[in-house]
Amino acid sequence: MNYNKKTVRDVDVKGKKVLLRCDFNVPMAKDGSGTITDDKRIRAALPTIQYLLDQGAAVIACSHLGKPVATFDSYVKKQAEKGKDPASITEESWKKSLAALSLKPVAKRLGELLGREVIMAEDVVGEDAMAKAAALQPGQIMLLENTRFEKGETKNDPELSKKMASMADLYVSDAFGAVHRAHASTCGVADYLPAVSGFLIQKELEIIGGALADPKRPLVAILGGSKVSSKIGVINNLLEIADTIIIGGGMTYTFIKAKGGSVGKSLLEADWLDYCRDMMKKAEEKGVKFLLPEDTVCAKEFSADAEPVVVDSMAIPEDMMGMDIGPKSIAVYADAVKDAGTVIWNGPMGVFEFPAFAKGTEAVAEALSRCGAITIIGGGDSAAAVQQLGYADKMTHISTGGGASLEFMEGKELPGVACLLDA
């Protein structure tokens, strides 16, 4: 995939209407009050928005939020699947579910951060959005309603893409967290408008793309998380370019079992044992160091209060399950990143939401914070862990996209990047 794409700096935006795809999929309070509990994603969009406004563009921002059900019929079907009586489901309850995922609170918060009014459209491509977009002046910004209120959004419907594109002269993509999806607002509109990246996507492409294409060596990849099956493509791709691969998290135990170890009640994907053996063999053939935990912190039950017990990774007792990497493994992993040139980390080392089993994840974050390498955190749980532990400012780059960064590291083409103009 070509990572070298045109950006907002490569085009003249003065006096133009710009359709800007942001990632405003922010966490909201569960009490229905419309309170945004973390505005990080809104803040991440500010540099691109401010640049466009300063350059005299009129900005039509858009984003999805959550997973609204776009039609009443689909809503009835979904509720029925959850065991509700279809006869008791009302249009009012459906409309209420949509209202809870309105972008109105985002428009309010964005306005506060920009220090100017953000005009809120009542729909995505309806009369209100079209009228407000037509009246929008240079230096003004408006926000369309949740793109997923349109049933054609997730189907990449050309008719919806065309309507959205008709409001603007240029498309700017700056939602890295959504570029792995071929939706109307993430790539369909690029069939009808010249398309370039914003600063957020530019940074992701430069840093992650650079690390994959021409890394500062040695390149160390740390892969955690619960399942081997979700990391197949990443391990396969990184075996072609990494010098060392470090494995942690729940997927460890499938590798341990594949090596002939006993894993007790640990998470195990028995269908992937042959795959694990193939990966370890491939690593050996390519001269890639493939590190598995030497010791494991176990417990008798999956609970925050469970008593932690350290055992040899190859001999986990029948009545126990692996919950974290042990102290020996921490020392080996910290040593492996000490002299690295580039470190890519995706996935925690253990059940880091339980304090007793967070030590491995904490130790890796701490080791990365002082190793002197280019450190790239691949979104999702690893990004959350680094933020929670207070090491965020010590990392070179924390990706804004969990699924997108994973697919990027797998070497997959990202539809929302492929549609942008090549530089």
Image: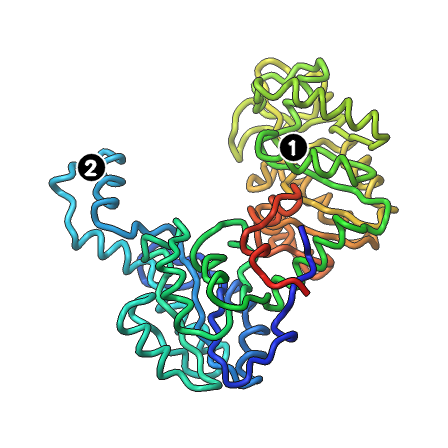
Q: Secondary structure at mark 2?
A: loop
Horizontal and vertical percent position of residue 95: 22, 56
As rendered, which of 86 and 123 lies closer to the eye? 123
Question: Could you give the CA–CA distance between mark 1 and mark 2, rounded to whole angstroms?
Answer: 40 Å
Q: Is residue 353 left or right of residue 223?
A: left
Q: Which mark is residue 84?
A: 2
Q: In the rendered picture of this protein, how many numbered marks are placed on residues? A: 2
Image location (x, y in percent) of residue 295: 74, 26
For residue 23, say whether it is visible: no
Name the residue rendered at 68%, 23% in the picture.
Answer: 276
Residue shown at the point (40%, 73%) measured from the top left: 167
Mark 1: which secondary structure? strand
Residue at the spot of label 1: 324
Picture coordinates of residue 3 (x, y %)? 68, 56
Image height of 56 relative to 105, above or below: below
Decide if residue 331 is on the left or right side of residue 377.
right
